[in-house]
Structure formats: C-alpha cells, structure tokens
Image (cartoon, grey):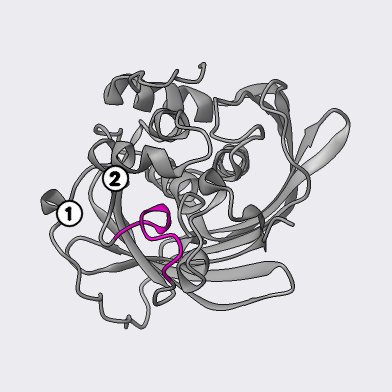
C-alpha cells in the first residue's frame, strides 16, 4: 500500500480492514516459523502495533483454540524495515493443564527486531471485581479522524502527514474524546487522554483475532498523555521524536474489537528521555477488558 498524496483520500474503510486482516494472516513456512509482510506507515519504520499483533498471531497458531491470551510482554529492539518481510519464530516454552506459554522472536535482515512473551489460559470461573469505567461521551457523538485531522494539517511539518495518518489508520474508527496533542501544542494539559475505537467493519467470531486487533490498536495513542503533559504535538509537528520501547497487556474479559472500546490513558511519569503510559480499555457497557502499560522514547529534538 502506498502513501496518499497531499489532498488524497484514504482507502475505503472495509477495504482497509480487509487489507489489515490479510496482514495478520501470516504465512507458515515451517513448524513454528511464520512470515509476515508490512503495510505503509506514517514514519519510515514498521508500526509497532503491527509487529506486536503479528507476533501474537504467530504464538496463537501454536496454542489449542480453547486457550486465549491473558497477558503479553514485549520489547521493541530495532526499527523494522517496512520493505522487508518479518520472520516470526515461536518457542514453545510450556504447555500446562491450564496455562500455555510462548516466546516469539521477530527477525529481519538477520537481526531480532522484536521479542514477545505471551501466556494463554483455558477459561475458569473465579473471583470477580474491576475498576469502574470513567465517564466518557457517546462515541457516535464525537468527530471521526477524517473530520478532525485535516483541520490541523497546517500544524504538521509536512502537510501530507494528515493524509498519511488517515491512510495508515483507515481500518480503525478512532475518535478522540478531547483535543489530540497536535491540536493543543504549546499548551500543557493534564496527562490523560481518552479515545474510542473499533474496527471499520464486522469481524469473524474468532476471539484470538479480536485480541490481536486490540493489540494492534493499543500502540497508536498510548503515549499521547505524555505529550499532553508538556504541550507537545508529537512527531508530525516536529517537537518530539519517539518510539515504543516495551509494551505489556493483560486481557481480563471477553470483548469484540468491532464494537466500541474506550481507551482511557494516562502518564504517571516522564524522565531520562522516556515516557510511561498506562491505560485501561473498557467495553461500551462498562466491563474492564484490558489493561495496558507502555514505555517509549520521548526526546526533544536539539
């Protein structure tokens, strides 16, 4: 998929979602070895959410269908080359009566670029409690990305950045509850951000697929709260450079990625050229589905 030109249009949402599903349908080239390709990104490296989702697909292909991910822990080791395939090697660490553990190494050009550990579990009844869902407006009442981004194109170093972001995110309906960082650059705000998201089309009834798509989206906006605390607009405005360093997720309850999910994000700390984001993802009816923590490089250009 090529980048849009300034003034261009993103692909049709359903076509974009089908392309994303094809991206996650890895080719098996040997037992426990899979190969994936990349899609266009808004920066000249593989999008971190893509490699995380593909690695989880690879791990899931080696696990019984009745066991779903309950957690993952990952490190981004090198910038991925979007022009080259990525090879995922799965190590079957443990197969227990209730839990299954997998380790995945993603390799490009002979070097590891990403490392994932994931744990899967059969369903069990147990104790139940959760943090209450925070207040948030109805997602249907919020502007879409296509309505929001073009309004701020003049704030980006490259006016075509808005088109490229829309193209890269065309498979996902992502709506900010408040102004995104690039809309209020220069105005420090509370280090908290909320977005609603869902896929731009219905998905098959495959729980692993929904988990992998939520993993894909989870890397899109989590460090926004770091930027908000310092009035920074992000890479597109040129006032910071950054990249994901590590990423952890815990999957608490069933959910569908093609139904609205509230991504409630905040940053408790930034220091040493790094920023920490933590978040909870809720279903629209208030169930806590996922917890997420990520640290990323957040540097001020000199």
Query: Looking at the picture, how far across and down is residue 106, in whole percent?
Result: 74, 39
Which residue does the numbered mark 1 point to in the structure image? 139
Using the image, determine if residue 100 lies above or below residue 236.
Answer: below
Magenta highlight on residue 185: yes
Left or right: where 17 falls relative to 250: left
The residue under the point 29% across, 26% down is 13
In this view, the residue in front, 143 or 98, is: 143
Determine if residue 35 is in view. yes
Q: Element at badge 1?
A: helix
Q: Within the image, what quadrant is residue 110 found in?
A: top right
The residue under the point 30% across, 59% down is 179
Determine if residue 97 is in view. no
Spatial separation of the CA atoms under disc 1 and disc 2: 10 Å
Query: Looking at the picture, how far across and down is residue 30, in whole percent?
Result: 74, 24
Which residue does the numbered mark 2 point to in the structure image? 198
Q: How many marks?
A: 2
Left or right: where 166 falls relative to 248: left
Q: Residues within 10 Å of mark 2 (few under 14, many from 20)?
A: many
In this view, the residue in front, 88 or 125, is: 88
Using the image, determine if residue 176 lies above or below residue 60.
Answer: below
Q: Quadrant of the C terminus?
A: bottom right
Q: Within the image, what quadrant is residue 210 found in?
A: top left
The label number, if any, that marks residue 11 in the structure image: none
Left or right: where 161 falls relative to 142: right
Query: Looking at the picture, how far across and down is residue 8, in whole percent?
Result: 36, 18
The residue under the point 47% across, 41% down is 156
Q: Element at badge 2?
A: strand
Q: Main secondary structure of the magenta part?
A: loop
User: Mark 1 or mark 2: which comes first in sequence?
Assistant: 1
Query: Looking at the picture, how far across and down is residue 270, in whole percent?
Result: 62, 75
Task: Tell me which segment is drawn in magenta.
Answer: 179-187
């Amino acid at each position: 998929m090529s980048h849009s030109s300034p003034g261009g249009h993103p692909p049709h949402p359903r076509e974009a979602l089908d392309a994303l599903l094809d991206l996650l349908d890895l080719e098996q080239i040997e037992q426990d070895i899979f190969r994936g390709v990349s899609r266009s990104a808004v920066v000249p490296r593989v999008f971190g959410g893509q490699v995380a989702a593909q690695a989880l697909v690879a791990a899931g292909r080696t696990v019984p269908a009745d066991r779903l991910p309950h957690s993952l822990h990952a490190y981004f080791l090198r910038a991925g080359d979007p022009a080259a395939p990525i090879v995922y090697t799965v190590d079957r660490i443990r197969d227990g009566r209730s839990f299954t553990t997998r380790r995945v190494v993603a390799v490009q050009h002979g070097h590891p670029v990403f490392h994932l550990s994931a744990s899967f579990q059969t369903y069990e009844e147990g104790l139940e409690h959760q943090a209450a869902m925070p207040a948030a407006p109805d997602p249907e009442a919020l502007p879409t990305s296509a309505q929001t981004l073009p309004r701020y194109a003049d704030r980006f170093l490259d006016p075509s950045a808005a088109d490229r972001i829309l193209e890269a995110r065309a498979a996902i309906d992502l709506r900010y509850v408040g102004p995104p960082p690039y809309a209020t650059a220069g105005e420090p705000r509370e280090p908290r951000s909320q977005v609603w998201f869902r896929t731009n089309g219905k998905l098959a009834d495959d729980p692993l697929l929904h988990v992998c798509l939520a993993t894909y989206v989870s890397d899109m906006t989590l460090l926004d709260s770091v930027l908000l605390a310092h009035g920074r607009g992000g890479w597109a405005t040129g006032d910071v450079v950054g990249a994901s360093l590590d990423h952890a997720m815990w999957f608490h309850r069933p959910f569908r990625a093609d139904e609205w999910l509230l991504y409630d994000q905040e940053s408790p700390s930034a220091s040493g050229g790094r920023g920490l984001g933590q978040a909870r993802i809720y279903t629209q009816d208030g169930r806590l589905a996922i917890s997420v923590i990520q640290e990323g490089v957040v540097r001020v250009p000199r």
